[in-house]
Amino acid sequence: MNQNETGVLSIVIPCYNEENTIETIVDKVIASPVPRKEIIIVDDCSKDNTRKILEEKIRPKVSQIIYHKKNGGKGAALRTGFQAATGDVVIIQDADLEYDPEEYPQVTAPIFEGKADVVYGSRFKDNKMKGYLANRMANWFLTRCSNLFTHLRCTDMETCYKAFRREIIQSIEIREQRFGFEPEITAKIAQKAVRFMEVPISYYPRTNEEGKKIGFKDGLRAIYCIWKYRKG
């Protein structure tokens, strides 16, 4: 399937307290070189001005905005967004500016061309990882732990840019509410024996002062999830 002819890309954007970046990232998503796209924003009960910005400035520009009545976490927001998606391929876009929507085609092309079912955009593959050393080491460690059980030879399990054929992601029951989503979904796609691929992407990390980062407790949860969702 050639995306230029028939393919539709569903872009799921979970957000929580992103008043400083949400409008900018949505404009970047709209301007991305994708001929047919569906943009779904899931606001996970933001407490700042995110909802006001979504209603006043963004709603006319996107396909859907879904509001959670209480904060559930990134995994919960993604679960809602995936269920609402109608495109042929689904990709995750964080609401910050760390990942560049201009790179959607290189992440999704293997799926639209029938070469893969799931594609991860890797910050490590053919690229120098940016950001804090502690975060890089944590990502490396968690990815290696995940690979012990999935055998995917993944280089960046924690990446935001994960793209799926819609039927695959909608067939998976996502149980994790927060950042445990990453090891959970990686384990479950490995168990489905799908065609998995990684492609290199760029990365523009925020500082700890600029945005939310995965904390120590999230790291422990990720380790637990790697063990919990292993193929048994």
Image (tube, helix red, strand yellow):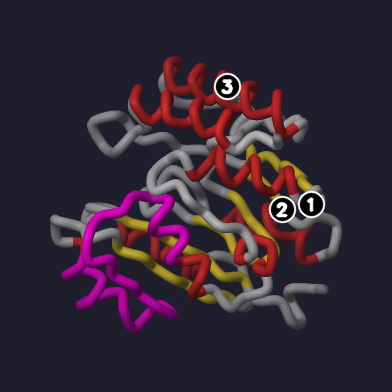
Query: Of the residues under marks 1 and 2, which one precedes in the sequence?
Result: 2
Q: Give the residue pinned by disc 2.
A: 118
Q: Is residue 159 magenta?
A: no
Which amino acid type corresponds to the residue marked 3 in the rendered image?
Trp
The residue drawn where x is 49% and y is 20% is 138
Q: Is residue 52 left or right of residue 58?
A: left
Residue 140: numbered disc: 3
Q: Assess whether mark 2 and mark 3 are in contact (beta carbons under 8 angstroms).
A: no
Task: In the rendered view, tell whether residue 214 sits above or below residue 201.
Answer: above
Residue 136 lies, in percent from the top left, at 50, 21
Residue 38 x/y as whole percent: 53, 76
For mark 1, what is the residue? 194
Q: At x 70% / y 23%, what residue is drawn?
A: 148
Q: Residue at x 44, y 25 (%)?
A: 131
Q: CA distance from mark 1 to mark 2?
A: 7 Å
Of helix, strand and loop, which one carries label 3?
A: helix
Asked if residue 79 lies in the magenta stretch, the reply is: yes
Taking 154 as reference, is 215 left or right? left
- Relative to the observer, which residue lies in front, 227 or 71? 227
Q: Residue at x 31, y 53 (%)?
A: 72
Eye-nearest disc, 1 or 2 = 1
| Three-letter residue code for mark 1 | Val
Q: Dot 1: within a 10 Å radius of its alpha carbon, few (fewer than 14), some, or many (20 or more) residues?
A: few
Q: Are marks 1 and 2 in contact (CB under 8 Å)?
A: yes
Spatial distance from mark 3 to mark 2, Cα to Cα? Answer: 20 Å
CA gap, disc 1 and disc 3: 23 Å
Give residue 156's mark.
Answer: none
Vertical comparison of 99 with 89: above or below: above
Q: Earlier in the sequence, mark 1 or mark 3?
A: 3
Q: Write down the region rendered in magenta.
A: 51-80
Where disc 2 sits, the SS reads strand
